[in-house]
Every structure is written in C-alpha cells, then in structure tokens.
Amino acid sequence: MAGNAKPRGAVRKSKKGPSAGTGGNNKRRLEGKGPTPKAEDRPYHAAAKRKKAAERASTKNPAAAKKTAGAPRKYSKGDGLRGEIVAGRNAVLEALRESVPATELLVARSIDVDDRVAESLQIALNLGLSIREAHRAEVEGISPNSQGIILSIKPFQYSSFEEIVQRAKNPMLLVALDGVTDPRNLGAIVRSAAAFGASGVLMTERRAAGMTASAWKSSAGAAARLPIAQVTNLARTIDEAKKLGCFVVGLDGESDTAIADMKVATENIMVIVGSEGKGLARLTREKCDLIVSIPISATTESLNASVATSIALYAVDEARRKG
C-alpha cells in the first residue's frame, strides 16, 4: 500500500550481529603477486638495457669484466665526485677514447642506452674503471647538461720546477707560459714541447689554464710523458732559470729580431709565450734576455699561441740539429 512505502532518502538500518562471509571465495584476491622484480630484471627498464650492454662488453673482454665484478654499485648522496668532471655523452666518450685519466663513470638509472653510452661502458670496463649508478635527479644535480652520464677525472699530478731542472738534458730547453688561458692551447703547447725535446712546461697557478680534461685531450697523451709544473711567481722562476745559466727568450710579434736570427738556440734557454690577447706581461718582458718574432704575412694579424710556440720550438730544434 502507498501508506506503507518508505519515504525517499530514508536510511536503511543495518541488521545487528555478524555478517555472512564469502566462504573463502575472495581469498585469491587478497594474495600478493610476490616481490617486485629488480629494475635490471625488467626487460623494458633502462637498468636492464644497461645490464645487457655491459654483458655484451664483458663477453668481448672477460678479464676486464672480472676486474670490475659487482659494478655498477649504488650511488649514495654525499659520496660526491672528486676532481674535475666531464659531462655529456659525446664529451665522456671522447675523453675515454683519449684515455684521459679517470676514476669513475657515473650513469643515471633512467638513461637510454645508445651507441655512445654502450661504448663508454665498454671502454670503462676495459680500463677497469668503477661504474656507479645514481638517480637521474642526483646526476643532473652535479651537472644539469650531463645527459645522464658523467666521468670523474683524476687531479693532474704536477711536477716542480726543481724536478724539471734535475731531469733536464743538456742543453736544457724550458717552455714557460705567461697567462695562457685556453686549455686547448695549453694542451697543444705541451704536445709540441714533447715533440721537440723540451725538458718541461711551466705555467702560473693563477690567471692561467690548468691541465684539465680538455687540455689533456689536446696534448694527445703528451701530458703523461712531459713534466709540467705550476709556479706561484713567474718572475721569480725566470730569475732562478737565469742562475742555472738559461737565456730567457720571449716571443712577441712586434720584435724586430726574427727567430731565425736567434744566436742562443744551442744554449740552455727558456722560451716564454705570452697570453692569447695581451702577449707578454710588462715585468716578464723586462726580464727576457731576448725578444724574438716570427715573420708572417702582413694580412695576418697574429698567430695562435700554440702555433707560435710550435714554430719557435721547431726553430730551436733545427738549430741544435745543425749545431
């Protein structure tokens, strides 16, 4: 009857006492699916791709793979990377190809493994480098433009002026840099110095390029064979070289004396190269025994610092061969 109908919106009272169960029919719904597989065991995960690339590399060089067993290890916050870093897929691969001294390779977990990353991993395995894995955010925190891969470079081991002099052959040939700031120029100068029999290269600690990864690559490995020293005061070092019997020769394009007319090439000499823009500093110029220039076409304003050094060292080497 209409009078017995329950009004709309009325709340139905629940029946007191325990409710009936399902008889175990929902038991399977409550069961878990087991532990979540590791990232490297999931076929489509980036970690699995890295693992596969590393395994391919290890089959090509089992000895290196055995040496680096257990890599990559986890990267923990606060570990940090010591020394200089090289970031980016191309830069890291080039540094590894040039055998730039490194300590470890840091790879982001979410990185897509392409040919560059795969080759970097293989070279790292061949070199016995530590390979570490980190969260993408942590890698980008170290270098925002890392593309998920970073190489940590060993700090360069400099010699001292005294060590270079002790190891120098007779006649001694020293190359000193007065404010060269481009690391690629520095690397090229080191390469030329090694090629033409220099005893070592000297540079200032401040306001000058150091032996970075870029300088090392430009030296084409010569930095591993030629002693390189940083000095706190170039003027004082010039005075010490003079006491050892060195003639100090500065390179300057405005000098009236051509390098071919240099009469002291067969003696103990120190060749000084000025900075890319300003050339020789005033005090350095005043301490030089001789300032020479390299004749060039009038249409060319100047020579690159590394090119000028190469020509000067060649002239010295040629004079010594004839002498």
Image: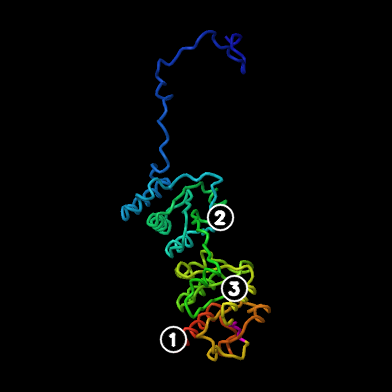
Q: From the image, state whether disc 2 or disc 3 is nearer to you.
A: 3
At horizontal 64% and vertical 73% (from top left) the residue drawn is: 236
Give the residues in magenta. Answer: 249-253
Question: Which residue has dot 3 on it?
Answer: 180
From the viewer's perspective, is the residue at label 1 or at label 3 nearer? 1
Considering the image in quadrants, where does the C terminus appear?
Answer: bottom left
- Three-letter amino acid code at disc 3? Val
Compare marks 1 and 3 and give the one earlier in the sequence. Answer: 3
Distance from disc 1 to disc 2, alpha carbons, whole Å, reads: 49 Å
Residue at the (58%, 76%) spot, across then down: 241
The single residue placed furthest to the right in the displayed view is 282
Which amino acid type is marked by label 2? Ser
Q: How many marks?
A: 3
- In the rendering, which numbered label is found on residue 143? 2
Q: x, y (%) of residue 267?
A: 52, 84
First along the sequence among labels 1 and 2: 2
Indicate the amino acid at tag 1. Answer: Arg
Name the residue at 67% across, 81% down. 286
User: Quadrant location of the N terminus?
Assistant: top right
For label 3, the SS is: loop
SS assignment at label 1: helix
Return the disc, 2 or 3, that comes first in the chain's sequence: 2
**Which residue has dot 1 on it?**
321
Q: Tell me where residue 240 appears, x and y as whole percent.
A: 60, 74
- The reply to whether discs 1 and 3 touch (Cβ–Cβ < 8 Å) is no
Q: CA distance from mark 1 to mark 3?
A: 29 Å
